[in-house]
Amino acid sequence: MGVGACLRAAVVLAAIASVDLGAQHRRFYPDDPIWREPMTQDVKSAVRYEPDLPYQTIENLFWRPGDKVLGQRAKNVNTVDEVPDGAFYVNRAGRVPLTPAMVARGANTGNGPAPGKWTVVSAKSDGVTPGFTIRDSANELWFIKFDPPGWRGMATGSEIVAAKLFWAAGYHTAEYHIGQLVPSNLAIGKDTRITPPGEMPRPMNQGDISWLLSRADRDPDGSYRVILSKAAPGRPVGRIKFHGTRADDPNDIVPHEHRRELRGYFVFAAWLNHVDAKGINSLSSLVTENGRSFIRHYLLDFGSALGSAAVGPREGWEGYEALVEEPGEIGRRVLSLGFNIPVWRTQAYFESPSIGRLPRDHSKWDPEKWWPHITNAAFRHMRPDDTFWAAMKLATISDDMIRAAVAEGQFGDRAAEEFLAKAIADRRLRILQTFVPKVNPIVDPALDRDGRLTFRNAAVDLAVADRAPAYRALWYTFDNDTDKATLVATTEETSSPMLMPAMPSSEYIKVDLAAVGGPEPWAKPVSAYFRRNSGAWTPVGFERQP
Amino acid sequence: MSPIAVPVAAQATRVEAIAEQQAEKSKELGAEGPSEAERVIRRILKSPFLIGGDGLYPWFGSIYSGTGMAIGAGFLKRLENAASFNVHSGISMNNSLVVRGTVAAPELWRGMLKIDGAAQWMDARGVSFYGFGQHSDLGQRERFDYSPTELTGNVTLKPRPRIALAGSYTFLDFDTQRDRRRFDEVQAPGLDRELRYHLTRGSLVYDWRPAAGYSTHGGYYRATFERNLEARGQQYSFNAQEYEVVQLLPLVREQFVLAGRALMTLTHADQGHAVPIALSPFLGSGSALRGYANRRFTDRNRLLLSGEYRWRPSRYLDMALFVDAGQVAASRRQFDLEAFDTAWGIGARFHGPTFTALRVEIARGREGLRLVVAGSQPF
């Protein structure tokens, strides 16, 4: 190619580039930031699909489904870097004034099953602990689960506590109650069938009830402590996928691995040691409200959380290793003749029949190294800004709220309850210490009419990091129509507030805020955007990049 | 939604921009369901071979000690209350054949009483015999074919969870054939003969391991007594006793397991009778004196001691360094501490919570290296 041809090609390319660059990229709409995810389409044809657990396990262990490009920013956050209320999540902690009483109530709308006989409509005969599905006298469907023998309160109480705290964090959960089952109060439905292990399906009989109950913890008076969870509203259509979108849900347009609340689910699961945080322990339900049908996603089945592994106390490895360990780690342990001993084999544990087994000391617990049994695409895509978001939610769940949730577990063992509440609080602290300082922790920027820029350093406020010596602000005018920022001035202060320098008239201002002399991640600025409304500056955008 | 999620749009509001994307998606909705890969995996995982369900299944295993790996097919039918019918047939690498069927009656008294029966026809080729005693010559191997037909009934009573009392009766009819006679009747009693037995057996077992197929703690203690009555009055009736102790000692929360096993088998032929070679105790196999050829040592009595240092690199993989020591003797009094043959080695065991799927070991005895491939724990 000659010089002339090269020049002609360069001119053409420049022309194309200029067209592209000149395209209108409006960053903010008048209704930004939105706090409710729009669900504008009626879901008409969703059918139930139950994913296969072994397949899910194999898929996540070996194939790593979902977007192959890691490190992308969550795609469902609003313009102020928050998750709007929607099908997966409702802002509670940090957004609405929660109280311990609210946390204790959680998703409950009533006091449990209606009085009268409980009619068994199906039973869980596989696994070690039994379970029933019953209809109460009000024709409501409830799921009943038990504690394993010798561990009264462990599985049922842990599930209640985890459910309350996941609700507080903002996830949709079912309605849970602790109850007492008297066998004589159970009636078998006329069409109820059972498939005992290794047998063919057949009608259920009283012997089956007795056999199932024989595997549950029994109280001296012959009754059984149970956890009752109310069937979620709507029609079940499957389980939460952690990658891609539902093909039958027109409102579901953000791949789930790019949803911040599903990435941040890792942090909450680590907090509560919910090692069974997999799709099968969730529910997607087709709900009709106000004449419109949409799919809402619930987290369920927290029996393998905290100190409980549902069928017994939590095993040491749970939370420290995945269901299948890393090949490199296995190789090291082979070669070391076993003397490469994992920490979970040697640390001290608190063990009690009422709460199960938990590490006695969480002061050195590393939430970044927490493992669920099976990871998923959303967890793999998680970034430090996602974990920061989740940690900030946790920061607003107080010790009193934790104690209120633990009290709902009705463990009947004061020492164990106190330990559990402390363990949950200690794990929360470790999460804050780990995830909050890991990105630039500036939050709540505000610009008043007088041009005073205020903000907070969340890591300093939470006492998980030392103060930064100074903060630097880069002040820009911002053209919303072209998404172009023009640097006007740089200012530096030792703390909030900072004064806005003289700025040209502009509807939008962008401020990049970074710490000077603090930890390295804090040097990466957060970007705050303000829109002028009747002389006042309204925060309209916020970005935190790890 | 952030600008990342919603690119260029001409709409007036964010909600409108998102609504347009949702409207676009509503034009091309699909159905939720398994992917093709999931369908394939489901089919594989639901095969009777993997889940033990009803129907035809492929069978892998061993037909008889020393006949090599075998493949075949089986059919399983499960019935109510843990009853089942199972039949399989297989052929091994050395052309041995087996057809085996079992019938399990429904469990009684909530599993306390179990009754089952089995029928089997086998043609095991090239079974080894090296002569009696600890000092038999490796080069003097005799090979014979062993063709038993068996009918067995078992009754197992478990009065307590860890205790089992088992009784069984077996009608056993077999013949042994060899192409070349290296040993005579005195040196190798019962070879080339057709023998028929009424075999009655009683066992007392105390087993406090979590699972027989794989455990990291607990113990197993067994005493078995047998009466082997030759039904046609030939001079091959005998009694047998077998005692076995397995102890698993976990260390550092089961990061390590010290495992030990002692096994002693004693036979007592009736006055003027002999124990046939095919039913004599032997050492040399993947579970009894590794590091030696199959059935390398045969005699009327055997004693085996095994010790293993096991470590657990994974929840699915155990490694082990092991030492086996065994001896055979014509009488119990001839057991001698100085006479043990030993072997040592290293092994890898791939397992689940209650079963061992694959065991691969290399063992070295005084006659060289041996590779062990098995589908169960050594003990």
Image: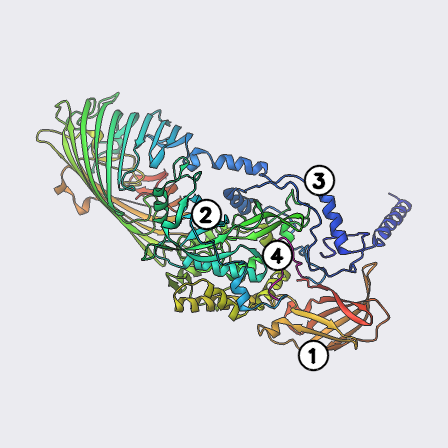
- What residue is shown with label 4? A89
How far is the residue under mark 3 from the one under mark 2? Answer: 39 Å
Q: Which mark is residue A494?
A: 1
Instruction: Name the chain letter of the residue that bears numbered label 1.
Output: A
> Of B228 and A129, which appears nearest the observer?
A129
Magenta span includes B141: no
Q: Which residues are magenta?
A: A82-94
Q: Position of residue A64 (x, y in %)?
A: 58, 47
In the rendered image, which residue does mark 2 sit on? Answer: A134
Mark 2 or mark 4, which has the lower sequence index?
4
* Chain letter behind tag 4: A
Q: Amino acid at mark 1?
A: Thr
Of all residues shown, which one is farthest toward the right?
A4
Labels 2 and 1 in the same subunit:
yes
> Dot 3: what SS?
loop
Q: Which mark is residue B28?
A: 3
